[in-house]
Image (spheres, rainbow, N blue to C red):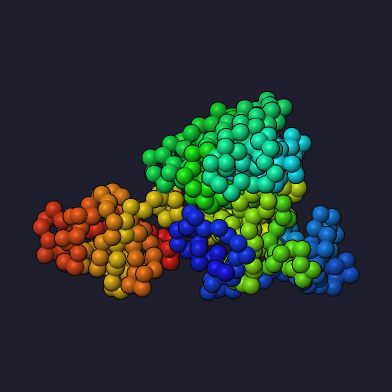
Amino acid sequence: MFSISEMSESVIPSDTVANDVDVTGADALDAPVATAPKSESGAPISREEVDELLHDNPESTVAEIEKATENLSPGTKGGFDSETREAIRTAKRVVVKIGSSSLTGSDGRTDPERIDFIADALEKRMGISDVIVVSSGAVASGMGPLGLTSRPSDLATKQAAAAVGQVRLAQEWGRSFLRYGRTSAQVLLTSDDAGVRSRARNAQRTIDRLRQLGAVPIVNENDTVATSEFRFGDNDRLAALVSHLAYCDALILLSDVDGLYDRNPADPGATFVPEVRSGNDLRGVVAGDGGALGTGGMASKVSAARLASRAGVPVLLTSASNIERALDQADVGTAFSAKENRLSAWKFWMLYAADSSGLLRLDAGAVDAVTRMRKSLLPVGITAVDGEFSAGDIVDLIGPSGEVIGRGEVNYDSEELLGMIGYHTEELPNDMQKPVVHADYLSDFASRA
């Protein structure tokens, strides 16, 4: 077991497979308690009773819950926080991520009816918002045509399935949106594209221009050339990165589960979690891995939701069958509140997407200076330099106990820096008196500032 909140505080390892993850939070403040719902008689309905309604029959209890909560303040349903859902309802630029199981049938082939159902809901939302689609399903879509009965485990077969599936998936999206006279565009990304700033900017500009031209960007990881399947981890994390780098106002994660539960929803004792305002709302929550056709289970979705919300983007997590309500009223699923003080696109990229070229080990005084005091990193606080890097590269900053405390853009080559560590600035030649990492180009995970 490991903690999603701990994973998200640092750079999420690209080769991590989330399997039965304990997502216990560690935020210091308790989440606010919403007003208790009332029944028609005026008697309060407990959070547990609302959870029971949702758990017992999640597809058909919406009307019951609306009726039971009709005397609440506007926008508040079932103890849900209205501000987050209102922000998602009114967002002008939205990323919608759809999982493999929502696009393919049990035979692994793309299902035109499912894609049409999703495209219909997306088209309706496009009346008020720009929509960017992050679509899984390339590998799954290629399995049926290649006669594969289960998801391949070796990289070459995965890439072969993706090569077939990407074509079929793009064709189906194009056919479906053409019913509305819309052109769809395929945008294939690798972690290298996100990790190199110039490539990330180019991808950002391409997506933005497609929207300006009225096309629907369909983003997917380029599985056919990725050297490791788990470089991004899954398309949930890709969606979180795209939501921030494309300056989106909301992220909607769709799968085959109607929201977050504190354990497997098949368990009769599972409790639905309608709102996540802080890590405290995740205490005791255990999430599992992906299904037969996909790689991203609930653990990866929670991790991606926290990543996006940490970047200032509110998130709604629900099932693809709920897409119409998710895009219209946002009164289904689990909502993750956005953190205040959204990171700049550059700092978010540096913290969560950029490739690190090396690391600098700091003493306790330097850690305090760059985290608490927001100071630049100077040579005197560096105890060691690891890796080969050049000026302008991104490096990890490591504390005395080996913990990654942040990242920054370094001003010196690694070879040059080796002769500077431990020295006060005034003891160095004039051409070596710049900070090693300037405060404006440094961000730490504790404050994410």
Horizontal and vertical percent position of residue 333: 71, 56
- Left or right: 359 with respect to 353? left
Q: Is residue 168 above or below residue 191?
A: above
Q: Quadrant of the N terminus?
A: bottom right
Residue projecting furthest to the right? 41
> Which quadrant holds residue 303?
bottom right
The x, y position of residue 117, in whole percent, is 75, 39
Residue 144: image x %, image y %? 69, 38
For the C terminus, the image quarter is: bottom left
Relative placement, left or right, of 263 versus 417 is right
Q: Residue at x 57, y 42 (%)?
A: 158
Is residue 324 found left or right of 401 in the rendered image? right
Q: Residue at x 70, y 58 (%)?
A: 259
Left/right placement of residue 428 relative to residue 382 reads: left
The residue at the point 60 percent across, 38 percent down is 161
Residue 216 is situated, as x and y percent measured from the top left of the image, at 60, 33
The residue sitting at 24% across, 68% down in the picture is: 383
Q: Which of 443/152 is in front?
A: 152
